[in-house]
């Protein structure tokens, strides 16, 4: 008995649900409705053009594989896009679009498409393999132009740029980029690869995850083809290995990589490695490999600061042709304090909900949509938090704020901090004074009155206080 389109799509969702993150599943897959199934062509209805484009760009491979599993190799996907009719009394119009990005996957493609336009299943043992046939496996969206520089990544980004301009010709070989999840390690590594291909099109670049490397090694071991595996990787001019920490569970793969590393390094080829921790902290990796990782430069990535997050959001919106109220951009930047991936995910979820609900983006919608990203929607602001904000704003050392000094910039920074502490915390005047070197409540009262008076007479001073007020308000949301 043939399955209905509802049953087919339900089965696809069961698979997808176990693969993508819960928040992404709710945002991108729950709004989809199956419409029809004709001759192995499943039509799904999506709420907007934006949804269609996002699915085609980010989830077409996943959709292809799940649909192929349910309907066989001839499965195809088409979209029905809802279009606003401009009249609330009428039902939304729809337009049907074939899934242009949809493609079937051969066994070779699903394994690792190292050779372009070549149906041979095992690319490593092709007689007379030509280097230019190797697909670099790079995402063209990962470039230096879209990788914003800040204090959090300055050393790594500039070292990467240097390597890209002269691969294998600097002391940064290997270049090891390390840091936590979602801080941009893969973006930077692939940006280097894309820049190398841009400057030197004939250079052979290859990006591969450590897990893919290990799986390939295992497959070739079963076929007694380890030498072919090693020989293939020795053809590469710029080899990028992502997440080398996973080598800790693959001793024999480490032996193969040791041979590849030595050959490439001695031949003046470039190696770029990423990890979730510094090489000195990697466990389960052979000491001889760790010593070679230390030959070059190890550069870490940190969580971006507020200004860098604003720049990241700005470039993301510019590249996608998006506009958003400034207060919403600031809200996202203030409240997403984990990593760049969460920052971009919050932006995309907000845009998706705006499109789905046909509603303009404002601060109220941002608070509602981002509550799954923001740890607390009503944070309690402390005196310490305000002190830190004011010190950063005026570039004043924290200990200076507590000292007895008559320097104008220090005195005003302290007075503003007391003023904001009184306005945004529940602490008594006595408690506020104790946070400033044991000053009494009369000093706090005098400071607050001074700030109010200066705001009435000094426009620049008033502008600074209002901007700091907005920072504290956003931080409390």
Image (cartoon, grey):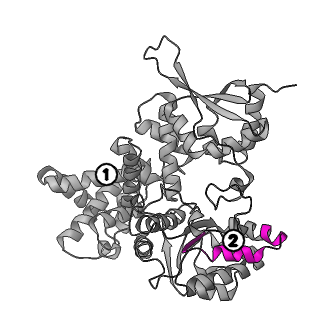
273 to the left or right of 379: right
Taking the view exactly as shown, the residue that stands out farthest to the left is: 457
Between 372 and 451, which is closer to the camera in this rendering?
372
Residue 22 in sight in this render: yes
For label 1, the crowd category at 10 Å Cα-Cα, with few meaning under 14, some 14 to 19 and many 20 or more, is some
Between 333 and 356, which is closer to the camera in this rendering?
356
Question: Is the C-beta separation of discs 1 and 2 under 8 Å?
Answer: no
Identify whether 381 is placed above or below 194. above
For label 2, the crowd category at 10 Å Cα-Cα, with few meaning under 14, some 14 to 19 and many 20 or more, is some
Taking the view exactly as shown, the residue that stands out farthest to the front is: 128
Q: Which mark is residue 246?
A: 2
Identify whether 335 is placed above or below 275. above
Residue holding disc 1: 469
Q: Position of residue 16 (x, y in %)?
A: 71, 43
> Which residue is located at x 26 percent, y 58 percent?
445
- Magenta residues? 219-241
Instruction: Classify mark 1: helix, strand or loop.
Output: helix
Residue 377 in sight in this render: no
Among the 4 quarters of the image, the one containing residue 437: bottom left
Q: Position of residue 61 (x, y in %)?
A: 65, 46
Q: Earlier in the sequence, mark 1 or mark 2?
A: 2
> Which residue is located at x 51 percent, y 67 percent?
189
State the CA–CA distance, disc 1 to disc 2: 46 Å
């Amino acid at each position: 008995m043939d399955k209905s389109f509802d049953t087919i799509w339900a089965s696809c969702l069961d698979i997808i649900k176990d693969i993508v993150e819960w928040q992404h599943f709710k945002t991108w897959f729950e709004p989809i409705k199956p419409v029809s199934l004709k001759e192995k062509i499943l039509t799904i209805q999506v709420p907007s053009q934006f949804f269609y484009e996002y699915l085609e760009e980010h989830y077409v491979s996943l959709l292809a594989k799940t649909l192929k599993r349910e309907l066989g190799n001839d499965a195809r996907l088409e979209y029905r896009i809802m279009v606003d009719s401009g009249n609330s009394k009428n039902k939304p119009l729809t337009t049907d679009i074939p899934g242009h990005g949809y493609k079937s996957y051969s066994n070779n493609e699903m394994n690792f498409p190292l050779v372009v336009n070549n149906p041979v299943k095992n690319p490593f043992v092709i007689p007379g393999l030509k280097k230019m046939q190797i697909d670099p496996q790079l995402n063209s969206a990962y470039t230096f132009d879209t990788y914003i520089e800040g204090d959090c990544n300055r050393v790594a980004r500039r070292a990467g740029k240097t390597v890209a301009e002269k691969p294998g010709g600097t002391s940064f070989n290997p270049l090891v980029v390390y840091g936590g999840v979602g801080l941009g390690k893969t973006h930077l590594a692939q940006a280097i690869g894309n820049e190398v291909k841009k400057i030197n099109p004939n250079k052979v670049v290859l990006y591969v995850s450590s897990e893919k490397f290990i799986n390939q090694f295992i497959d070739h071991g079963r076929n007694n083809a380890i030498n072919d595996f090693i020989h293939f990787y020795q053809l590469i001019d710029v080899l990028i290995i992502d997440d080398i920490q996973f080598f800790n569970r693959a001793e024999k793969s480490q032996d193969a990589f040791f041979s590849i590393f030595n050959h490439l390094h001695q031949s003046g080829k470039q190696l770029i490695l990423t990890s979730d921790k510094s090489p000195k902290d990697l466990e389960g990796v052979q000491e001889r490999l760790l010593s070679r990782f230390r030959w070059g430069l190890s550069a870490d990535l940190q969580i971006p600061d507020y200004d860098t997050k604003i720049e990241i959001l700005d470039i993301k919106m510019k590249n996608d042709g998006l506009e958003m109220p400034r207060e919403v951009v600031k809200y996202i930047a203030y409240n997403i304090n984990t990593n760049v991936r969460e920052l971009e995910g919050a932006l995309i979820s907000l845009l998706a909900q705006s499109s789905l609900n046909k509603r303009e983006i404002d601060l109220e919608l941002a608070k509602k949509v981002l509550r799954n990203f923001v740890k607390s929607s009503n944070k309690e602001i402390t005196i310490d938090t305000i002190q830190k904000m004011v010190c950063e704003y005026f570039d004043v050392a924290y200990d200076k704020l507590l000292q007895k000094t008559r320097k104008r910039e220090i005195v005003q920074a302290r007075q503003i901090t007391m003023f904001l502490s009184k306005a945004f915390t529940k602490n008594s005047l006595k408690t506020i004074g104790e946070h400033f070197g044991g000053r009494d409540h009369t000093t706090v009262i005098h400071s607050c009155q001074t700030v109010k008076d200066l705001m009435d007479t000094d426009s620049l001073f008033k502008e600074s206080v209002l901007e700091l007020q907005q920072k504290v308000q956003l931080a409390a949301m």
